[in-house]
Each structure stands twice: as C-alpha cells, then as structure tokens.
Image: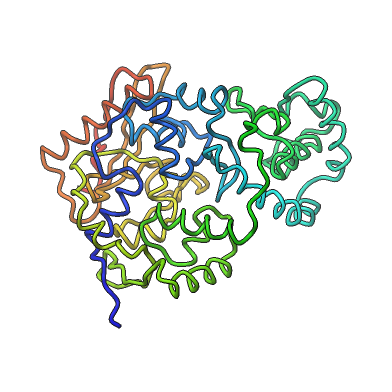
Amino acid sequence: MTRQTLSNTLARRLFLHRHELGTTPSGTGKGADLAGLIDRLGFVQVDSIRTVARAHDLILFSRRTNYRPPALKRLLEKDRALFEHWTHDASIIPAPLFPHWQHRFDRDSDRLKLGWKRWFRDGYEAQFDTILARIQNFGPVTCSDVGQGEARGKGGWWDWHPSKTALEWLWRTGVLSITGRDNFQKIYDLTERVIPAAHLTPKPDIAKHIDWACIAALDRLGFATATELSAFWASVPIAAARDWCSGALKSGRIIELDIEAADGTLRPSFALPDVIQSANNLPPAPRRIRILSPFDPALRDRARAERLFGFFYRIEVFVPQAKRQYGYYVFPVLEGEEIIGRIDTKAFRDEATLRVTGFWPEQGVAMGKGRLARLEDALEKLAQFAECDRVAFSSDWQRGR
C-alpha cells in the first residue's frame, strides 16, 4: 500500500500543539495547571545558565505567561508532584513516572561502574556508607557539606572531590534524590524521604516499561522514527524501540507514513492511526511571537527541528568568542508555526534592563512594522519575567537586514 503523507504545514502544526506551543498561552502557571503542563511535555530540561532566565523557567514561561519560578519550586520541594533526574540530560519529571526510572537506576549502576572508574578520582566508593550514614542521621546535604579535607579541583565534573562523586553516584542510581536546590546547588536526601510513598512502587517489568516509553514518546512527538522514540526519554535502547515499532505496526497500534520536511523531502515515520485526522482538526497556531530557550523541548532534537522548520541551530556557549557566528547564548524566535530568527539578549538585573544586542532573521523573513511590534512586545514580556523594567536595544541590533 502507498504510505500516506503528512504535509510539512500539518507536521509543524501537530508537533507544536503536542509541545503546547500551538495555542495562545493561558492558565495560572502554577499548581495543577503547571503540573499538567509538565506532564503533557513529559519533562522539562534543567540548566544553570541564566543570561535571561534558566532553561526550565523559560520553557514554562513560553507556554504560560503567568508562570513564575516559585510555582515550580513549590511543586518540586513541597507538593512533591515532580522529581529531578536524567532523561537525555538533567530534567524535571512528573513524580508518577518514578517507577519507570528504576530501570534507569539499574542500568546506570552497571554502566557507570566502569566509566566512572576511568573518569573520576579514586576513593568515591569508600564514601558511600559514610555519606548515607550522615544523611540518615543528620538529614539532607549539599556537596559543600561533605568531603572536608578532600582535594577540591577547579575543573569541571571530571575534577570533583570523591564525596561529591559519591553523592552523584548515589543520586544517579536512585539511592538518593534531590530534595531541593539552594542557589541552584543540589540538596540530597534519602529517596524514601523525597519521593511520595505512592510512587515508591516496584518497577514495571521490562516489556511494560518499553511499551510505556515508546507509546508515551509517540504521543508527545506526534510522529517519530524508532531512533527518536528511543531518544525521547533516553530510557530504552534503539534496538528495543525498533522491535516495539515492528510489533506495534503488525498489530495495528501504529501506522507508517511519510513526513514532509521543510525542504520537501519525505521521511518515513511512525504515528498513531488517526494522526492525519488529528492534524487536520487542529487550528493554526496564533501569530504570537515567543522567545524560546535553546533547550526548549521543541528544539531539543536539533536535527528534527531543522527538518521540520528549516532552522539550523547550535548553541555557542563552548565556542570561543572569536569563532561565534551569533553569540554566547542566542534564543530562537518562534512566530506562529515558523521559526523566524534568533536573538541575542541578556538581563542586567542590577540595571533592571534587558539588553538586546542582535536579532538575525531567517532567510526570507521580512521584518515589517507589524512583526517588529510583535517582537518588541514579546521582549517587553520577557523583560518583566526576568525582573527588568525596560528593554534597551543596541544601535545595530537588527542584524542581517
């Protein structure tokens, strides 16, 4: 049979709706509304860089303009509706999914035994019992509270002192959990004192875990290859995802169709059987402009974003300044269902000013008065979120015109 094709327009629309970017931002941005948003996204990546706002906060603000960071802190640290662990990177995850992460704890325990012995200083394994006893008897700790007298390097993760490495090991393998953060520094406690008892249930068997991981990823992506399903949660091997796709295709749970890319090429993907009807029923995204985090879920898979939107993006944080094409931390700009450019902006909170040093529109994007007004309105809202009173533009901020 000839495969059906989902046009690029409908593929973008479906993808953005599944990522909560297809409608006008509404909702309280706190409590059950915020927890529901994170559940629909699957997770929110955590990042420490705060040139404007931290990644997790900007991701949520892009979808709920009423959102403010204390609402997330409450869900994490008081309500325990969320927990922090790894997907493809450090992420905030709905607490009901915790049983599935026990498979990751087992996998990491096996995988890290060899890797960490190569990467880190010796001595961290000897600290496991000491750290656990301290936390059991005296409560949560940060890495600053442990390892007194141990050599502390000035490098990155590879230069951790042994007790810091031990803390991270115990967290990565599920013995400890993050109970909160203090100035973004992790606070560790025993998992049974952090995760609600309702979610400390036995892990599902591996077949149920793989089925959940693949169907939950497909639901959030709208359409995907086996590789993309594997990568979404970074929870199942590619081979397992391929086997799942093969079985689900034979049973009729999913279909195979072609997804049209921005350049007109077609890419075979899997989707739920009603995907084309669902996409046709969606309204176009509003023409609202949103300034997205570089780690936004819609952009996390750079190759997928480039295929769908024709937008090539690479973060330049680790690129020497002289070799940067755009800037240290440049934000993609979404208008409706099109990524129209990228913007270099930074909050100077001591001056209560959001400074804009450059905006580069994508090829073929005309910055008329209406579009400029929408961009400036988005920047004003972003400034308020970043605790700034005004936006200041450099004289040459409109680049590439």
Horizontal and vertical percent position of residue 41: 42, 44
Q: Name the one closer to the observer, 392 or 273.
A: 273
Q: Name the one closer to the observer, 307 or 317.
A: 307
- Above or below residue 31? Residue 251 is below
Quick check: 394 left or right of 135?
Answer: left
Q: Residue at x 11, y 42 (%)?
A: 368
Horizontal and vertical percent position of residue 383: 32, 25
| Colour convention of the picture | rainbow
Q: Quadrant of residue 183?
A: top right
- Above or below residue 399? Residue 211 is below
Q: Residue at x 80, y 19 (%)?
A: 138
Horizontal and vertical percent position of residue 43: 48, 43
Horizontal and vertical percent position of residue 387: 38, 19
Q: Residue at x 31, y 45 (%)?
A: 342
Q: Quadrant of residue 124?
A: top right
Q: Residue furthest left?
A: 369
Q: Name the one closer to the observer, 210 or 109.
A: 210
Q: Name the one closer to the observer, 221 or 150.
A: 221
Quick check: 327 left or right of 112?
Answer: left
- Above or below residue 51? Residue 117 is below
